[in-house]
Amino acid sequence: MPFLFIATIALLLSGCSAQTIKRADTLMKEGPLPQQPPKSGHAPVNGLNLYYEVHGTGGGTPLIILHGGFRMAALLGEVPKQLAEGRQVIAVDLQGHGRTADVDRPLRYESMADDIAALITHLGFQQADVMGYSLGGGVALRTAIQHPQRVRKLVIVSAAYSHDSWYPEVRDTFAQLNHSLLEFMRESPEYQTYAALAPRPDDFPKLLDKMGELLSRSYDWSDEVPRISAPTLLIYGDHDGISTAKMVRFFELLGGGQKDPGWDGKGMSNARLAILPGRTHYNIFDSPEVVAKASAFLATPMAEQ
């Protein structure tokens, strides 16, 4: 199987830019592995022990940040710290990823969203802002749909509201994802970090199978998206794995792009759309523009949204 094909799968699902790969590869060769921050733990929610780590301090609304597929909090780099000014940023390892051991249930956006809502309650918060990339963006979206009372603001980076939002070649890649790729991924930072941190490192082939099954499933949440009440920021690259038309359609489903807002902007919806030039699905999450856009959006008072 061509290396380029394998690399495409790993990069597409994890959002691993060349910079991130270099950083993670250096960690693997020179050690030590990424260490847990001073405050971290496992929350017993919905039959699993969900790992989380807390960055920053402050009394602002906490931010839950959710990684892409095959990634984990340990590979988010500086992003949680950069977003942690005046607030706590809580990075989570989703089901079967990183320090969160898998359980006997399929991977579903809906059940992982229930996990995030339960985590917010477990940590003693009434609400949180939720930000997710790719796989994590789908989970963040479902959290806002299923648990609107728990989500104050929503930031979605390179994620889709429907299966057909992804380009056909991306969907073809999803369909070929399974345990047979294990040998091709052994040298990847995703696998090596997983092997070092996961409670059961031998579960990685199962994760490959479960991810392939999840990402190959057809879904369309277009009837539910308009019911989201939380102010929402969508961030994409102008050369993303998702159709530009579907990015715009997502924005429209959230109430954006419906009419001229007037000279004073009073006709604006509470949705925002940012399409970053020169960014792809593979390199967007590490970009400084994402942190800048998300920080500004989260800091804007609700009354001005």
Image: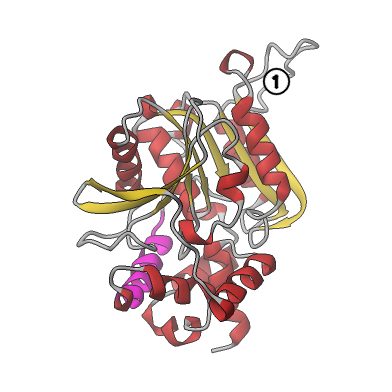
51 relative to 90 in the view: left or right: left
237 relative to 195 in the view: left or right: right
Q: Quadrant of residue 234?
A: top right
140 relative to 7 in the view: left or right: left
State the count of labels.
1
For the rendered model, the colour scheme is secondary structure
Residue 74 to residue 10: above or below? above
Residue 94: x, y in percent? 37, 54
Residue 160: x, y in percent? 53, 48
Q: Looking at the figure, which quarter contains the C terminus?
A: top right
Q: Nearer the viewer, residue 59 or 62?
A: 59
Q: Residues within 10 Å of mark 1 (few under 14, many from 20)?
A: few
Kind of residue at badge 1:
Lys
- Tell me the SS state at disc 1: loop
Q: Does the stretch in magenta take in 207?
A: yes
Q: Does the stretch in magenta take in 216?
A: yes
The residue where tag 1 is placed is 259
The reply to whether residue 221 is in sight is no
The reply to whether residue 177 is in sight is yes
Q: Residue at x 62, y 21 (%)?
A: 269
Residue 196: x, y in percent? 40, 74
Q: What segment is highlighted magenta in the picture?
A: 203-218
Q: Nearer the viewer, residue 280 or 45?
A: 45
256 relative to 121 in the view: left or right: right
Residue 68 to residue 301: above or below? below
